[in-house]
Image (spheres, rainbow, N blue to C red):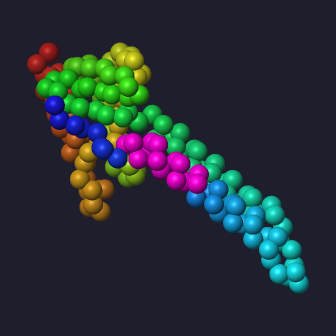
Amino acid sequence: MRRLSSSLTFFYKKIFPVLWIGFMLTVFGLQIWAVPHARADAPSQPIFPLVLMPLLLTGVMFLLYRKLLHDLLDEVWLDGDWVVVKNRNEKIRVALSDVMNVNATTMTNPRRVTLMLRTDSRFGRNLTFIPASPRGFMSAFQPDPIATELIRRVDALRGVSR
């Protein structure tokens, strides 16, 4: 079996949001703490902008998390003509012949590969993961090698079944 998904998926799904919220709480706390400790002769600052910016950035993080990270699978492995998918202590096997489409993003960070299935699975019809692809500036403009390989394998299986 060969791992297709990135080992950084856990970081993106679990650790990064906690770091982001912790950073926002720290900034918010420092701003709230600094307002009463300002010099007595200085004009008082309104508290609304101090509260608005961390709340706005937290809202942006929530939207980005829901759009880019929430639906990611924990692990995806290639086992011959099968894809083994693990997510939240559950595991399923999907035949590559059941894959209808392979879609890959190029200009997002993290990159995403989505396998659209012909029928619903326990994890839904779309299986999305972060590919374990090479990193670098120029790789952002090239097709993902894992997605390209999956497209070739699915196409070859379709040719056999015709």
Identify the residue at image location x=34%, y=47%. Answer: 8
Q: From where the camera sits, is residue 126 visible?
A: no
Q: Where is residue 9 in the image (x, y as percent from the top left)?
A: 37, 43
Q: Where is residue 131 in the image (x, y as percent from the top left)?
A: 29, 42
Identify the residue at image location x=23%, y=53%. Answer: 134
Residue at the farthest left position: 160
Q: Is residue 138 above or below residue 149?
A: below
Q: In which quarter of the image is residue 126?
A: top left
Q: Position of residue 158 (x, y in %)?
A: 17, 21
- Name the main secondary structure of what is drawn in magenta: helix
Q: From where the camera sits, is residue 28 visible?
A: yes
Q: In this view, does 53 lie above or below 17?
A: below
Identify the residue at image location x=75%, y=66%. Answer: 33
The magenta stretch spans residue 20? yes
The magenta stretch spans residue 60? no
Residue at the farthest bottom position: 41
Image mark count: 0
Q: In which quarter of the image is the C terminus?
A: top left
- Taking the image as shown, residue 75 lies to the left or right of residue 59, namely left
Q: Position of residue 116 (x, y in %)?
A: 34, 26
Q: Give the range drawn in magenta.
A: 9-22
Q: In this view, does 147 lie above or below 40?
A: above
In the depicted view, which residue is nearer to us: 76 or 126? 76
Q: Quadrant of residue 63?
A: top right
Q: Quadrant of the N terminus?
A: top left
Identify the residue at image location x=42%, y=22%. Answer: 124
- Taking the image as shown, residue 60 lies to the left or right of residue 92, namely right
